[in-house]
Image (tube, rainbow, N blue to C red):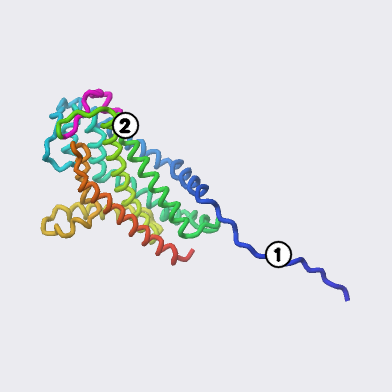
Amino acid sequence: MTEVATAPAVPVTGRAHASLARLVRAELRWIFRRPRTLVVLGLLAVIPVIVGIALTLVDSPGPPGGGPGGDGGGESLLATAGGNALVLPVGTLAMALGLLLPLSAAMSGADALAGETAHGTLRGWLLAPVGRGRLLLVKSIGVAVFTVTATVVMALTGVLTGLVINGTGSLFTLSGTTLSFPAAMLKVAIAAGWVALQLWAVGAVALAISAWTEHPMVVLASVLGGVIVFSVLGLLDALDWLHPFLLNHSWTDLGDVLRDPMPGGPLAEGALRAGCYIAIALSLAYARLSTKDG
């Protein structure tokens, strides 16, 4: 009898996982190469320029200081932005935080999971192989980077437009005090960081909804509908017990950044609320992804 040669047994080993840094770089390249991402960033960059030019043309600079009153909303802040280079970037951020910036964050979260599922590219991530937890981490980092980029772009163009129109000698707080350029830029940075955190919370909610559907438009409609409903509920005094649980409850307090001294209570409460929304939304998204087939 002839002996049949058999190949030596090869130990089965798990497939190598791609590094987290490599996955994040791939995700960011995919995000910032999309034409609609560049269009959105371009529109956000143009808004402070348009607002600054409009305020210059109507020639209504308003008083340097807004006094202790006011709700800190975008419209009330922009009433004093015509002669105040510090107010323009923060005022445009507050104005866009009402709808446009949350729409941008929701778009990013919708494209991250539902968009890729609809195009069949999400399965490729899982075949790479990438675990469900790592996938969600990469997607959440991508949404966070996009929200930071959108906020920084808008703040930078607002600062440059305000300085070109009003110069460095018009850096007033709403309390009437004059700030140095570094101190003024620190306040703008605080405002931009706080807004980016709020947008990350919106994007995390969009990620959670995106994990349950394959239709990005469903995610956009759900998030924007939620923002509108939360805004309406915030106007009802009979539901004041519910207001601390609404994500956008502190959004009108952004103007507190421009006061001297800066009251940190409402802003800290808003940051904590956004962090809770991020933790809960990402937990729900992971619970869905870990049990989802395919």
Q: Is residue 14 magenta?
A: no
Residue at screen point 25% across, 53% down? 247
Quadrant for the N terminus in the image: bottom right
Labelled disc at residue 176: none
Is residue 287 something one can see in this rendering? yes
Q: Please tell me in which quadrant of the rendered image residue 60 appears.
A: top left
Q: Residue furthest front?
A: 261
Q: Is residue 252 above or below residue 81?
A: below
Q: Are marks 1 and 2 in contact (CB under 8 Å)?
A: no
Amino acid, disc 2? Thr
Q: Position of residue 106 (x, y in %)?
A: 34, 50
From the image, tell me which residue sits under label 1: 10
How far, Cα to Cα, is label 1 from label 2? 60 Å
User: For the magenta stretch, what is the residue range?
Assistant: 160-174
Of the two numbered discs 1 and 2 in the rendering, the one whose residue sits closer to the viewer: 1
Residue 209 can be seen in this image:
no
On the image, numbered disc 2 is attached to which residue? 157
Looking at this view, name the residue that lies furthest to the right: 1
Q: Quadrant of residue 93?
A: top left
Residue 217 at x, y percent in the picture = 35, 53
- The one nearer the camera, 188 or 290, is 188
Of the image marks 1 and 2, the number of the one nearer the N terminus: 1
For label 2, the SS is helix
Residue 167, magenta (yes or no): yes
Q: Dot 1, how many residues are within 10 Å of its Cα: few (below 14), some (14-19), or many (20+)?
A: few
Q: Label 1 amino acid? A: Val
> Tag 1, which secondary structure?
loop
Q: Is residue 265 left or right of residue 1?
A: left
What residue is at 30 percent from the left and 37 percent from the top? 189
Residue at image x 16%, y 32%? 80
Q: Is residue 3 left or right of residue 281?
A: right
